[in-house]
Image (spheres, helix red, strand yellow):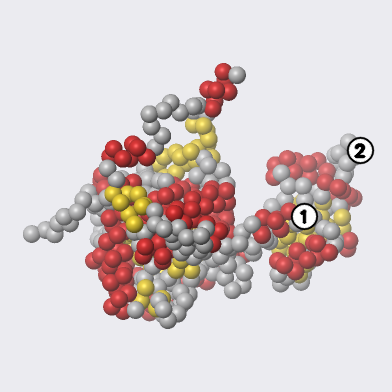
């Protein structure tokens, strides 16, 4: 007879946290959200990679490009650059992230000495940047021959046809930094010489980057930045179970810090083979997560196959229609709880702690806190991050509202069929994801800050200062349909600010 899980499978929306005792020392500023990213012998060693915040961005075309990777690493999380693109372009994205040194900005406004004031003004209007590098060839990586800032010209008094070489500050008069300079050395030079920017050049005088005075404060505003030993952003990459023999070496060479097998259903021989190939060729030096699974059996299989972390979730993603199409999946809360118990059991038996990631279906910020309380070490989010400026998807207006486009990897638009591949010759003939719009929400920094603040406050309500404490001590209750109604504003007419403003 088939195996039946007697408990209904539930979502995070069906639970709430019951507060625990909050001591005087239990304040949000003292909460640590640090969490392991890869397996380790807990109690004996530290994990080789940890996150400073329990959030990673989904392996999706609409979510995790290079800008997202830098912005999220600045906050302390990790992006997994999507694998549903050519090996070359994915590796290039990784290289670009690794080339972006924290606080060092690539020059995207460049002119040549032969350009004119009119060119400068047009570029300024287009990019919004008033500092421009003047390079021999007018490109970002050309030999630096000067810079132009708005202090170098007066529009009302100058002929728009004036050549840049006539009014730029020439290289000989510039203070520049060498390519091995650290951010703090660069900032010291800026400070000591009262500069607004410091161009960074290599030994051939070729432009590498700028460090700007205005970025100094914002850099200080990222205390959780996730950097490697060379102060480069930590970045992950998605891989599939088909072309790993070519893709993995290219990604590792490009500098990827961690990989993750991107599959809608991971309890398969294909995942085991992929991990085995990585172990055979790289031993434990290449870190790789696997998934997705939704029960203890699936977790045990991937842990024994050697996964560095295991991802949980089938069918819960906001753009995912796998449950409707194939009838597979499990409520995200139940799946997380089952896998967390299996993870703890595996640790008891082996001494190895395999971090688990709850992937998909996070709607409210408190769902993240619940996922952690249910035993997840971190969460993966798609819709959440796709709303921000830093996502690679387009900003559009729909009925006068700003929206971002958001499409599933299993949609006809992404055509990421490898993610759903179960082997054999038969090609997939149906979709498992939709193409959609989601409300635009602004910058990642502000939104993530708000979300983390809510998580920290809730953790204090539960009397917990760390994620392991929350996993151990949280008290969780199921909620009835009626008490969900009680949880929102009810039995009042909520005032509409726009309506009030119109009346005035
Ligand atoms: P969400 O955060 O709810 O938008 O879910 C994102 C997750 O949904 C991804 O990390 C992935 O596991 C899953 N996904 C991505 N594409 C699709 C699909 O097309 N069905 N599902």
Packing grade of label 2 (10 A; few <14, some 14-19, many >=20) is few
Query: Separation of disc 1 and disc 2 at Cα?
Result: 23 Å
- The label shown at residue 157 is 2
Nearer-the-camera pick, 279 or 460: 460
- Ligand 1 contact, mark 2 (Cβ < 8 Å): no
**Residue 166 vertical placement versus 172 (above, below):** above
Residue 120 lies left or right of residue 83; in this view the side is right
**Residue 404 vertical placement versus 421 (above, below):** above
Residue 75 percent coordinates (x, y): 56, 58
Q: Quadrant of the N terminus?
A: bottom left
- The label shown at residue 471 is none
Q: Residue at x 71, y 58 (%)?
A: 216
Q: Secondary structure at mark 2?
A: loop
Can residue 336 be seen here? yes
First in residue order: circle 1 vs circle 2: 1
Q: Residue furthest right?
A: 157
Q: Looking at the rendering, which quadrant does residue 483 occupy?
A: top left
Can residue 314 be seen here? no
Residue 281 percent coordinates (x, y): 41, 78
Q: Are marks 1 and 2 in contact (CB under 8 Å)?
A: no
Q: Residue furthest top?
A: 503
Q: Looking at the rendering, which quadrant does residue 225 occupy?
A: bottom right
Residue 466 percent coordinates (x, y): 46, 64
Q: Quadrant of the C terminus?
A: top right
Q: Secondary structure at mark 1?
A: strand
Q: What residue sits right under mark 1 in the picture? A: 133
Q: Residue at x 77, y 51 (%)?
A: 131
Q: Residue at x 82, y 51 (%)?
A: 148
Packing grade of label 1 (10 A; few <14, some 14-19, many >=20) is many
**Residue 398 vertical placement versus 46 (above, below):** above
Residue 293 lies left or right of residue 172; in this view the side is left
């Amino acid at each position: 007879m088939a195996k039946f899980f007697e408990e209904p499978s539930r979502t995070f929306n069906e639970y709430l946290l019951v507060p625990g005792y909050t001591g005087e020392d239990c304040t949000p500023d003292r909460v640590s959200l640090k969490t392991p990213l890869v397996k380790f012998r807990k109690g004996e060693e530290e994990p080789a990679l940890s996150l400073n915040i329990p959030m990673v961005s989904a392996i999706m075309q609409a979510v995790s490009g290079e800008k997202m990777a830098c912005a999220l690493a600045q906050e302390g999380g990790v992006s997994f650059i999507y694998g549903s693109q050519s090996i070359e372009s994915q590796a290039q994205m990784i290289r670009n992230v690794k080339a972006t040194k924290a606080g060092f900005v690539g020059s995207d406004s460049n002119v040549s000495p032969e350009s004119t004031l009119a060119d400068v003004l047009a570029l300024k209007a287009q990019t919004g940047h008033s500092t421009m590098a003047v390079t021999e060839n007018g490109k970002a990586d050309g030999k630096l021959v000067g810079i132009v800032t708005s202090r170098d010209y007066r529009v009302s008094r100058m002929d728009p046809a004036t050549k840049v070489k006539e009014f730029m500050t020439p290289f000989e008069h510039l203070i520049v930094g060498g390519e091995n300079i650290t951010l703090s050395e660069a900032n010291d030079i800026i400070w000591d010489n009262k500069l607004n920017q410091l161009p960074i050049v290599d030994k051939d005088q070729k432009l590498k980057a700028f460090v700007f005075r205005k970025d100094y404060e914002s850099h200080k505003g990222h205390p959780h930045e996730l950097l490697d030993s060379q102060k480069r952003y930590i970045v992950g990459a998605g891989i599939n179970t088909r072309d790993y023999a070519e893709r993995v070496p290219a990604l590792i060479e490009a500098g990827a810090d961690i990989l993750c097998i991107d599959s809608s259903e991971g309890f398969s021989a294909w995942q085991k083979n992929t991990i085995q190939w990585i172990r055979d060729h790289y031993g434990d030096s290449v870190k790789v997560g696997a998934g997705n699974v939704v029960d203890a059996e699936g977790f045990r299989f991937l842990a024994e196959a050697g996964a560095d972390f295991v991802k949980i979730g089938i069918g819960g993603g906001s753009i995912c229609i796998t449950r409707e199409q194939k009838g597979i999946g499990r409520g995200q809360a139940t799946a997380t709880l089952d896998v967390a118990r299996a993870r703890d059991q595996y640790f008891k038996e082996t001494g190895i702690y395999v971090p688990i990631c709850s992937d998909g279906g996070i709607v409210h910020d408190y769902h993240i806190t619940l996922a952690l309380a249910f035993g997840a070490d971190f969460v993966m989010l798609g819709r959440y991050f796709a709303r921000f400026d830093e996502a690679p998807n387009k900003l559009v207006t729909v009925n006068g509202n700003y929206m971002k486009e958001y499409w599933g990897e299993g949609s006809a638009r992404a055509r990421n069929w490898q993610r759903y591949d179960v082997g054999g010759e038969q090609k997939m003939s149906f979709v498992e994801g939709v193409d959609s719009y989601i409300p635009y929400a602004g910058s990642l920094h502000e939104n993530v800050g708000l979300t983390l603040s809510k998580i920290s406050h809730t953790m204090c309500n539960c009397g917990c200062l760390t994620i392991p404490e929350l996993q151990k001590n949280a008290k969780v209750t199921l909620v009835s349909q009626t008490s969900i109604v009680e949880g929102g504003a009810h039995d009042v007419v909520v005032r509409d600010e726009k309506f009030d403003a119109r009346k005035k």
